[in-house]
Image (tube, rainbow, N blue to C red):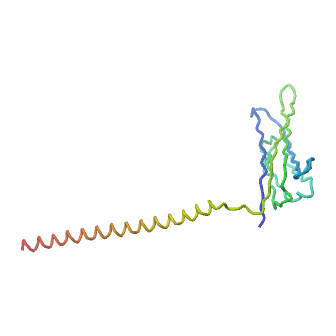
Amino acid sequence: CTFGHLLGCISCKRREEVSASTTVDWHFRPPGELEYRHIFHYKHPTADILDDDFSGRLEWRGTQHDDIQIGAVYLSNVTFNDSGTYLCTLHRTLFLPVQNEEVSVEKEVQLTVVAVANRELTTVIAEIMMFVLIVVLQLWLILVLVYCYKKISADHERREAKKALKVQREA
C-alpha cells in the first residue's frame, strides 16, 4: 500500500487587480542536517524535479497560471526518508505602473512519517459503544412497535366485541 502527502503552500496577493508572475521553489532538509536541498522548481507551465530522491514522486498541485497563489506539491510513495522540513519559497514579481516589485514569501512544512497511525483505545471503545447503542435502540424500537400493535389490536377487538354484544341485545 502506498501513501502520499500534500505539501501545502499558500501566498495571496493583497490586491487582485495587480498582475504578477510567480515561481515556486521547494527545498528539503532531513532531520539532523543544517542545509536544505533544492528539490523542486515550478514556473508555469513547467515543473522540474531537481533531486533524484524525489524523481517521479513530486507532482504540482498548485495554481495553474502565471500568478501562482497556491504552491502545493503532492509527494507520492512517502517513505521514512521523507521525514524532515520542507521549505516553500514563492518569488513573485508584481507588475506595477511605476516599476516592478519583487516579493518573496517562505513557508516551512514539517513532515514526520510514522509506520502506522495507532488507534487510541478511546476510539475503539467509542466505536463499540456506538454499535451497541444502535443495536439496542433498534431492538427498543421494534419492541415499542410490537407493543403498540398489540394494544391497538386489543382495543379493536374490544370495540368489535362491544358492537357484537350491542347488536345481540337489540335483536
Q: Residue at x 77, y 43 (%)?
A: 10
| For residue 44, side relative to residue 162 (left or right) | right
Residue 56: percent from the left, percent from the top?
A: 87, 59
Relative to residue 169, is residue 155 drawn left or right? Answer: right
User: In the image, residue 6 lies at what x, y percent?
Assistant: 77, 53
Residue drawn at x 90%, y 58% is 53
Q: Residue at x 12, y 73 (%)?
A: 165
**Along the viewing direction, whichever of 18 and 111 lies nearer the viewer:** 111
Residue 135 position, x and y percent, is 49, 67
**In which quadrant of the rendered view does residue 112 lie?**
bottom right
- Which residue is more in the foreground, 10 or 111? 111
> Looking at the rendering, in which quadrant would you find the C terminus?
bottom left
Q: Residue furthest front?
A: 121
**In the picture provided, is 167 more to the left or to the right than 78?**
left
Compared to residue 21, the image places residue 6 above or below, namely: below
Quadrant of the drawing holding the N terminus: bottom right
Q: Nearer the viewer, residue 84 or 11?
A: 84
Rendered position, 49 above or below 168: above
Q: Is residue 137 above or below residue 59?
A: below
Q: Find residue 136 and report its horizontal and vertical position in percent.
A: 47, 66
Q: How many marks?
A: 0
Q: Residue furthest top?
A: 98
